[in-house]
Structures are given as structure tokens and as C-alpha cells.
Image: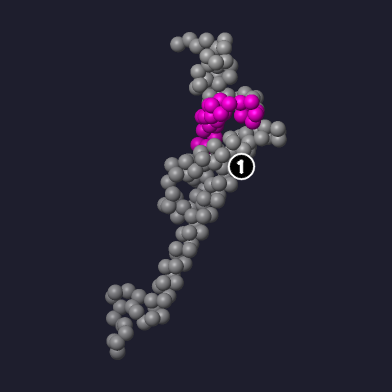
Amino acid sequence: MQVDYSSADRVPKEVGLHGKAPDLMDWPEQRRYFALLSKSGTSEEQKKSIRDLLFKVNLGLVRMVTVAQWERFYPAVRATMGQDDLFQELAWKMSYCIDKFDVNRGYRFSTYACQAMYRQAVGIQQRIRRNFSAEHAFRVERGRRRGSAGLPEHEDDEEGPGVSA
């Protein structure tokens, strides 16, 4: 299949500038797209298609951060949350980064997005561990209250209220 790249409006949506596939777009081309995204004369429809293209281009970045962070998660966190859930949370964070990225600061988007996604993953892990710790502390406290009220700790215990030796 041949595609005519002579006119910008005839370039298919899944093809980036100069006819490259989205996953092969280098940083200077991404920079041009981010400049168009921040330009005030760009229509909302064009901004949406640019956001979608930048999201597709940088989806491998989300996959890389997901795998790297999943290996670092504690077993209690892995039991609570699936790897697909983490991927979804980090993809949401990357879409947020696409909207907030400022080209004029001189950083690459990958640097900005990776740092934001790593912070998001650490925050998720801390939130889950905090909830897990609170639940564990509640169970321990409930067990202490049972023991202090004179109730048997286990069903096999013979001693209980009203039983005298």
C-alpha cells in the first residue's frame, strides 16, 4: 500500500510527521507536536488527535515503568493490585503529563513522564501498604480485646468465662 505524503491533510492519523510510524518518532518530532499542542491557534480536534498520537508513541514508556515498578512492589501490594491495574494507573498519569508538559523548559518528555509515573507508582504502593497496615493493626487490636474480655482465643480452648478448674 502506497501513501501519498505530499500533503499534510492526506497523512493518515496513525502515521507521524514524515511518514514514520508512531512508535518510531524521535524527540525532535515529538517536540514539534508538543509545540502544536501548546499553540493557541490549534483547534480542539487537532489537539485531541495530537494527544492520541503522543499517547500511542509513548505507550512503551508506560509499559517499561510498569514492569520496573511491579518487580519492586511488596507481595502484599501485588496480592491487592494486579499488574494491569498498575498499567492503567500509569497510563492515566502519562495522559495527564501530556497535557501539562511544557516544551520550553528544555526537558525531554520521557524524563518528565517517567518521573511522574515513578512517583505515582510509589504513591500507590504506599497507599496500599498503609491500608494493609491499618487493617493488620485492627485485627491485632481486635484480638487483644478478645483476650482481655475473657473470651477464648480459639475454639479449642477449654477455659472461658464460667469454667473453673
Q: What x and y, as percent, mark residue 15?
A: 52, 20
**Callout 1: few (<14), some (14-19), or many (20+) C-alpha neighbours within 10 Å?**
few
Q: What x and y, as percent, mark residue 3?
A: 50, 11
Quadrant location of residue 138? bottom left
Q: Residue at x 43, y 42 (%)?
A: 84
Q: Is residue 55 magenta?
A: yes
- Can the viewer see residue 88 in this picture? yes
Please determine whether, in this image, residue 118 is positioned above or below residue 149: above
**Which residue is identified by label 1?**
115
What's the magenta region? Answer: 36-64
Q: Nearer the viewer, residue 75 or 19?
A: 19
In the picture as drawn, the residue positioned furthest to the right comes out as: 105
Main structural element of the magenta stretch: helix, strand or loop? helix
Please determine whether, in this image, residue 98 is positioned above or below residue 123: above
Quadrant location of residue 117? top right
Q: Is residue 75 magenta?
A: no
Q: Residue at x 53, y 54 (%)?
A: 126
Rendered-image quadrant of the N terminus? top left
Q: Nearer the viewer, residue 90 or 160?
A: 90
Q: Secondary structure at mark 1?
A: helix
Q: Residue at x 52, y 10 (%)?
A: 4
Q: Amino acid at mark 1?
A: Gln
In the picture as drawn, the residue positioned furthest to the bottom comes out as: 165
Q: Is residue 147 left or right of residue 111?
A: left
Quadrant location of residue 141? bottom left
Q: What x and y, as percent, mark residue 44?
A: 56, 29
Q: Nearer the viewer, residue 158 or 49?
A: 49
Q: Residue at x 29, y 74 (%)?
A: 155
